[in-house]
Amino acid sequence: MEKFFAYQKDSREPCKYGRKCFQTNKEHTDKYKHPPTKDDIKVDDKKMTRKRDLKGKLKSSNKTNGESSNSDHSNRPNEESHNSSEINDMEVPERPEQTISTSNSEPNSITSSSNQQNLTEYAVPSMRQHSQQQQQLLLTNSTLEDCSVDDGIVPSTPTLFTPRRLDGETVSSPHVPSSNQIQRFTFVGESQPSQTPDLNDREQPDDPPVQNETDFDCLKKKISELFLIKEMPKEFYDLWSFCKRQCSTHPEDALLSVGLKLVGPYDVLAGHMNGFNANDVEKTVLHWRYYYDPPEFQTILASTTSEFHIGYYRDVPLEFPVCIVSNDSSKNCIIQKLGKSLFQVLRKHLQSLDSKIANTLQKKLHAYEKRKVTEILLGRECLPVTKTFHKAGIVVPYDKKTDIGYRPLSESEYNLKKILKSYHEASESKKMEVMDKLQPIISYANIASDECDFGTGFELGIDFFCDGNPDLHRICKQLLVTAYSLLRRPQFATIIKAHLNNRRKGPNMSIL
């Protein structure tokens, strides 16, 4: 106990690691003091013996462990029980060590030494932790506080206490600040920001100021919610940063000099879709969706003078795009594959314009691409099972060994186009005759879907969609909704239903 009180009177600063501190260098020990160990503090276990005085009353006398008791053997059980209860009163139940789990949502936000200690503790085996717990100091409940508490662990409910000795004098604990040193507990991320700046939040010298990381994550999440897709690729945001350098007030209009405009999900970054939420997906999925755009097509660049538009093509809604494509809905339904890099595709388009403004912008785009763009699309992992009318092809799970997943239509592409053309040109009285030719093809596709060849109904539905005949929208919706549901692509099913219910023609496909 003498070493404990000597520790209390020591004027050095208490070490935050307590008895767990492993540093033994002289500079550390001269500056910080460490609490005594269990071996340094020994509580004398004194056996209490009882004697009867002349009046028959019990009186107790303290004896050392080496002395023998003169009491009667009949009183020995009571003495042992009394001693055992006294020893139990001296023991302080061990506190379960509180662990702090770090979250991935707050990287680089806390870099204090206490967290580094916690991260080190996670790698310690459980047996070692148990041995450390057994070495905790045993002191009295009413007088002394456990000195081995880890200062790096902040209690869930901050409480301050003042320990006292048996004589009533206040004990100045090294782990309890005095009344004039008490500070309000603050948790990083709630009331005050972290003192360590995040490297990701620093502004690049080449780029204009952008939204902070929290706002940026909200914008990415909103794009996914409004357009029912996975987050956009990195090059999508790189192009936005480039346009922001060209026109800081309205980056979406930075390419107007070459007849292009950033549209679709770029309107979320521009703040034009703040009034929409996840309940408006039936409207938002139609934002800049042209007449012949299947659910896999998402427009991001639109021409200001025609129906030509550029966008991403996805085979699966919750995966990254596989390529960049284009279409001119005023001409046909054919989807043209342009490449895997948005910057390369845009530079080729500017080169085709053959103008001074386009050439100047192309050089700036190429210089920015060399410095900033580091990722491009990976392309398709699987080959398409068929091309369909729009020539971009469709990808479905297909097992070559069992030949399950896709089977060709009962009619060739040439014959199917011929039947659809005759149905479009037929009068009301003769449409039933042409429908009799289409019905076996539809039935065959439905049978194939029942037999796990989902690609057949998918192909026929896309062909009806590319034909563009409003009279076939009901059949097209039934085929594609069934196919997307069986392929576990419900987002595309929602998009095709909304599109067929409100299919529009024209150059301006904005819903704003």
Image (cartoon, grey):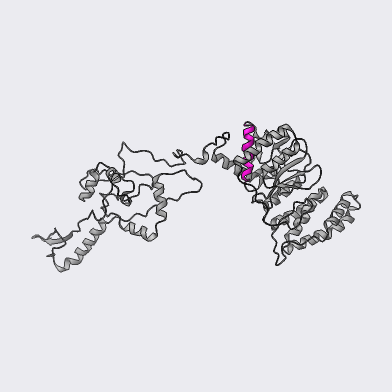
Query: Residue at point 46% right, 49% down?
Result: 102
Q: Position of residue 136 (x, y in %)?
A: 30, 55
Looking at the figure, which quarter contains the C terminus?
A: top right
Q: Position of residue 475 (x, y in %)?
A: 79, 54
Q: Position of residue 56 (x, y in %)?
A: 11, 61
What range is drawn magenta here?
A: 231-248
Query: Residue at point 60% right, 40% down?
Result: 371
127 shown above or below 314: below
Residue 234 counted in the magenta span: yes
Where residue 442 sits, quadrant-wise, is bottom right
Q: Position of residue 370 (x, y in %)?
A: 62, 41
397 shown above or below 288: below
500 shown above or below 512: below
Q: Is residue 432 left or right of residue 77?
A: right
Where residue 234 sits, quadrant-wise, is top right
Q: Is residue 140 left or right of residue 386?
A: left
Seen from this angle, which residue lies furthest left?
54
The answer, for residue 132, to whether it is visible in the render is yes
Report the front residue among 35 and 45: 35
Report the front residue among 51 and 93: 93
Q: Main secondary structure of the magenta part?
A: helix
**Label total for image:** 0
Q: Is residue 122 left or right of residue 297?
A: left
Query: Residue at point 41% right, 48% down?
Result: 116
Report the front residue among 115 and 336: 336
Seen from this angle, which residue lies furthest bottom?
73
Residue 358 counted in the magenta span: no
The answer, for residue 275, to whether it is visible in the render is no
Where residue 399 sits, quadrant-wise, is bottom right
